Image (cartoon, rainbow, N blue to C red):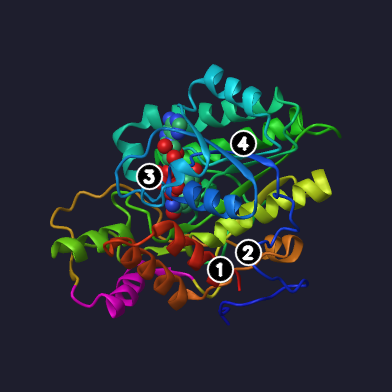
Amino acid sequence: MALQSGNFGKNKMTGIDLFQSVYKGKKILVTGDTGFKGSWMCIWLKELGADVYGYALPPLTKHDNYVTTGLASKIQHLDGDVRDKEKLQAYFDKVKPDFAFHLAAQPLVIDSYKNPHYNFETNLMGAVNFFEAVRHCPSVKVAVNVTTDKCYKNNEWDYGYKESDPMGGDDPYSASKGCSELITHSYLKSFFNVEGTANIASGRAGNVIGGGDWADNRIIPDMIRAHQNNSELVVRNPNSVRPWQFVLEPVFGYLRLGEKLFTHKKQFSGGWNFGPESNANYNVNQVVTEVKKLLPQIKVTSPKTTEKLHEAGLLKLDITKAVMQLDWKPRLNFERTIAYTISGYLEELKAGTDVYAARLEQLKQYCN
Ligand SMILES: NC(=O)c1ccc[n+]([C@@H]2O[C@H](COP(=O)([O-])OP(=O)(O)OC[C@H]3O[C@@H](n4cnc5c(N)ncnc54)[C@H](O)[C@@H]3O)[C@@H](O)[C@H]2O)c1
């Protein structure tokens, strides 16, 4: 049965600190802080009492979560490209972080077809530069690379991929994330395998949704744009099944993983899946139907052209390892995932809203 929001697990948890206070007073360097997931992660870390340092390209639009929440005035940030090895290293050397989370990436399948070279450079050499910076920065105790469910060789089968399944990727984005996993594995085996070196791991999450994501060609931002503009929503792949998750679910996973790597060290190295419950995978059509319950006026249509770039049709994650070993679990069922997401957008679209306060309120609701 899908879980409702609420406390769970061995430890009764209170407040937003689900991490034994390991982040309090620590320096945390987050690449990709100007992005959707990175900005939510920085809010959580900031509220945990961490000193947060971001490194990323500037936000793309004024609607981005980083901008609407005013995060720039709440954390330290350096504009920089992850392909710039020297600049990234210099930032690590200056900050001397305790933890590093790598979320900066080219994250879109369609964009990876448009510019595969940039996609591979950013996602492969970005990961290499991240681990090089960690390797040469002795203050770093924990480093987590964020990849995706698409890193697995997709066989279009009906069971969830396990961490031990082979890497793959047909489209350039998926292949680049499979490679990013192999890079993580290689650095783990070659450089971070002895005591005293940083404890490293990777997090593989599903399709992440939530307020503040305005990326092109993602179903929820496309629906919100259709709602705002009173335009028709073109649904590209209505039958594609995805592991939909509210943004705080994987962020909770990455932070829990960071906590375990800090407290138990190399025991928690390697790859970790963070997805919904096995019976909570829904297709695009079901997402559209659920959103339309809240925003009924959105008009939906099918693509007019027959041109189709390959994207996986069926993609599920097996989360048993994280549930059993990290004491992590999704806290929201599908209906609440969509409800949290839509209310996040409606809050930010309301004139005069303090978006940072609204995000914090959602964080508290999510945790309690
Ligand atoms: N959103 C999802 O559904 C989802 C699902 C699984 C995995 N992921 C992964 O999570 C991570 C974050 O994704 P997101 O949805 O927040 O994406 P996003 O596009 O909102 O944010 C991407 C971030 O990376 C930065 N970035 C991109 N290219 C860069 C470069 N060359 N140099 C420096 N910074 C660069 C951007 O400035 C931004 O801060 C990515 O690794 C993505 O692949 C996302």
* Residue named by callout 3: 108
Q: Secondary structure at mark 1?
A: helix
Q: Position of residue 9 (x, y in %)?
A: 73, 73
Q: Amino acid at mark 4?
A: Leu
Q: Nearer the viewer, mark 1 or mark 4?
A: 1
Indicate left or right for 193 with 362 as reference. right
* Residue named by callout 4: 182
Of the 4 image quadrants, the one containing the N terminus is: bottom right
* Residue named by callout 1: 364
Residue 34: image tag: none
Q: Residue at x 43, y 78 (%)?
A: 335
Q: Earlier in the sequence, mark 4 or mark 2?
A: 2
Residue 16: image tag: 2
Residue range (magenta): 281-297
Q: Nearer the viewer, mark 3 or mark 2?
A: 2
Q: Amino acid at mark 3?
A: Leu
Q: Earlier in the sequence, mark 3 or mark 4?
A: 3
Residue 157 in view of the camera: no
Q: Nearer the viewer, mark 1 or mark 3?
A: 1
Q: Report crowding for label 4: few under 14, some 14 to 19, many 20 or more residues within 10 A (C-alpha).
A: some
Q: Earlier in the sequence, mark 3 or mark 2?
A: 2
Indicate left or right for 70 with 13 as reference. left
Q: Secondary structure at mark 4?
A: helix
Asked if the residues shown at circle 3 and circle 4 are in contact, with their CB atoms under 8 angstroms apart, the answer is: no
In the rendered picture of this protein, how many numbered marks are placed on residues?
4
Q: Report crowding for label 1: few under 14, some 14 to 19, many 20 or more residues within 10 A (C-alpha).
A: some
